[in-house]
Image (spheres, grey):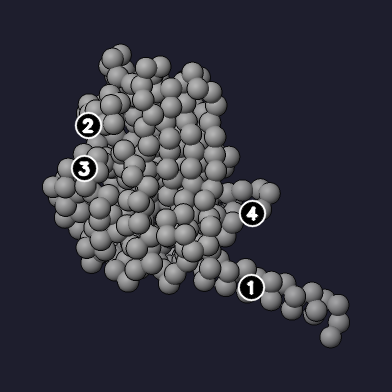
Amino acid sequence: MNTFGRTLLAAGALGASALGYAAGIERTHWTLRKATLPVLGESSPRLRVLHISDLHMTPNQTSKQRWVEALDELEPDLVVNTGDNLAHPQAVPAVLRALGPLLDRPGMFVFGSNDYYAPKPKNPARYLLPSGKKKRIRGRPLPWRDLRAAMTERGWLDLTHRRLRSTVGGVAIHAAGLDDPHLKRDRYSEIEGRPPADVDLSLGVTHSPEPRVLDAFDGDGYDLVLAGHTHGGQLCLPGFGAIVTNCELDRERAKGPSEWGEHMRLHVSAGLGTSPYAPVRFACPPEATLLTLVPRSQGGEQRSVDATPGAPVESGTGVG
């Protein structure tokens, strides 16, 4: 075999190995990230917020369901779900099993495109196209109303185009949310305006972290915005990071905490799922994040990753 042939063979073997890892191992390497963000008022106690996003649940994903359910052991003060829970018409019971005891804790949510419409097979090359160049391909409607009813019956707050005030763990919170900007369903005019001055935290919640939305929250003086949608890039290159974000957000902010403007912090979850038609992750494991919010005077952000094999909450692997 000549040199060219050997090179092609080696490249093919490497590609097959990478695909096997991305589809068979990393896709279910559930990971808990932790970050400390200084966003609260000076007299506020700390607040532990569990940020969950992009479950993309199908009924048979029992490993994911068990892992998410075990997150209750973290005893968060507040759970924020930033959408894309569903990936199958019969997935609502599976999502509710996964959230399980977390639904007994204070919670807030907005929905994303994959709560409204089922995924469809797509050309994999579309992944590399800029977000604005992609024609929307929508599947059949999903039972998002059933999911919303179940969440609100358990006490979680639907923030879709709403401004709400709540006190959680001794922290006075003003929260406002949007419908999915990825589908251009957002109507910021319905929630615009500065948050009240007498709260400890002003929190914005959106599925897709489109810059136009982040600029609006920042312009109104919000302390923190939580978002999902990007999957952290889903396919990342070591040393380079996310290839694309599937929205107008820059690659450097595809996951984790960052600053937006002079005052506001942003946290983007890399999420816990994938489309059933693209069940791969590379250099970007599925994740949930435990955010510890502290007063601004306590300094800069801190990050860590818990991925101890076998730990029931921090990480695990399974069949999907």
Q: CA distance from mark 3 to mark 2?
A: 13 Å
Q: Is residue 27 above or below residue 35?
A: below
Which residue matches tag 3? 156
Q: CA distance from mark 2 to mark 4?
A: 38 Å
In the displayed structure image, the side of residue 240 where residue 313 appears, left or right: left
Which residue matches tag 4? 237
Which residue matches tag 1? 17
Q: Is residue 64 above or below residue 167?
A: below
Q: CA distance from mark 3 to mark 1?
A: 42 Å
x%, y% of residue 200?
A: 33, 21
Q: Residues within 10 Å of mark 2 (few under 14, many from 20)?
A: some
Q: Residues within 10 Å of mark 3 (few under 14, many from 20)?
A: many
Tell me the kind of residue under disc 2.
Answer: Arg
Which of discs 3 and 1 lies nearer the camera? The answer is: 3
Residue visible at 54% across and 39% down? 303
Q: Are marks 3 and 1 in contact (CB under 8 Å)?
A: no
Residue visible at 59% across and 50% down? 243
Tell me the kind of residue under disc 4.
Answer: Leu
Which residue matches tag 2? 162
Q: Are marks 4 and 3 in contact (CB under 8 Å)?
A: no
Tell me the kind of residue under disc 3.
Answer: Trp
Tell me the kind of residue under disc 1.
Answer: Ser
Q: Residue furthest right?
A: 2
Q: Which one is earlier in the sequence, the residue at label 3 or at label 1?
A: 1
Q: CA distance from mark 4 to mark 3?
A: 37 Å
Task: Identify the disc placed on residue 269.
Answer: none
Q: Is residue 265 above or below residue 239?
A: above
Residue visible at 37% across and 37% down? 48
The quadrant of the picture occupied by the N terminus is bottom right
Q: Is residue 138 above or below residue 83?
A: below
The quadrant of the picture occupied by the C terminus is bottom left
